[in-house]
Image: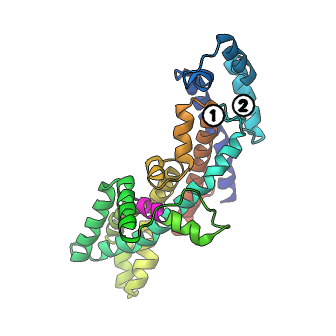
Amino acid sequence: MLRYTVNRVLLMIPTLIGVAVLVFFLLRVVPGDVVEIKLRGDGGSVSQETIEMERKRMGLDKPLVNQFGEWMVGMATLDFGKSMWTERPVIEEISLRLELSLQVALMATLIAVLLAIPMGTAAALFRDTWIDYAVRILTIGGLSIPSFWFGMLIMLTLLGLFNWLPPITFTPIYVDPVANLTQLIWPAMAVGYRYCAVVARMIRSSLLEVLNEDYIRTARAKGVYEKLVISRHALRNALLPAITVIGLEFTFLIGGLVVTEQVFNLNGIGQLFVQSVSRNDFTLIQGMVMLIAAFYVFVNLLIDLLYAVFDPRIRYGT
């Protein structure tokens, strides 16, 4: 297991380097100039000489290979440069919003897992009964309703019944836990509903397949209690594909909640992505893409390791 983990960690390095090469050079193909947008975006009259001086100050006049080399050297020391728009460190810009997006993703994942496992299990065990049909209706609704639209329904309900609107500023959980949870529980529920629907349907289909396996019939024939057959033998194996879905959905939530953040007035990573793309802020976009890529490769490694925990037949010897 240790050797496998070390090998996978080492494989992350070329993966992240490949992402860095793609994002750096593809962004340079995109039309638009951050300097012109910054200086002439509001219709200001700025001479071409001033623009060239600003480009030189930002280092944009250097060859792309030199710019890429400087950026890679900076990444090796966790220095992602400065935002071309605000001229603040990229790490600082991201850290201000990552806490919010990460907490919403964690809360949505917790809500989804706590609801999806019993729902999917009940639907599989009581197949073609009213319980199964009820779970199907709920999960199909979760897959069909966009998260931002469900969030708008939550907002309208809270406004109509309790005259409540989301606060303008984000309150960290370590400052005021009550205010923090009051603000973030609703977007987490809006996102977690769809998340729960995907995982519940995956658990249901996987558990139905596992319940027809020979080792399940053998366990029942040996007189093992039905609860142990379900929890120890069937559910653990049925969770393997669900774990993959949970991990991929979690990483998507880190930067994919643009519209939901807008509905609940949250200034998270999704909003920062939109702002940086509209401004052609290359360094900030590069930093956020590398952050999401690092999340993906780390979560994939964690998922592979969890496979061995839930299925004792899986052993990583190499």
Helix, strand or loop: magenta stretch: helix
Residue 23 % position (x, y):
58, 31
> Contact (CB < 8 A) between labels 1 and 2?
yes
Residue 65 % position (x, y):
69, 20
Residue range in magenta is: 186-194
Q: CA distance from mark 1 to mark 2?
A: 9 Å
1 with respect to 227 (left or right): right
> Farthest residue in the right direction?
77
Residue 176's tag is none
Nearer to the camera, 288 or 127: 288
Q: Is residue 288 visible?
A: yes
Q: Secondary structure at mark 2?
A: helix
Residue drawn at 40 percent across, 67 percent down: 158
Residue 238 % position (x, y):
41, 67
Residue drawn at 54 percent across, 38 percent down: 275
Q: Is residue 232 magenta?
A: no
Q: Which residue is mark 1?
A: 20
Residue drawn at 43 percent across, 62 percent down: 192
Quadrant position of residue 32: top right
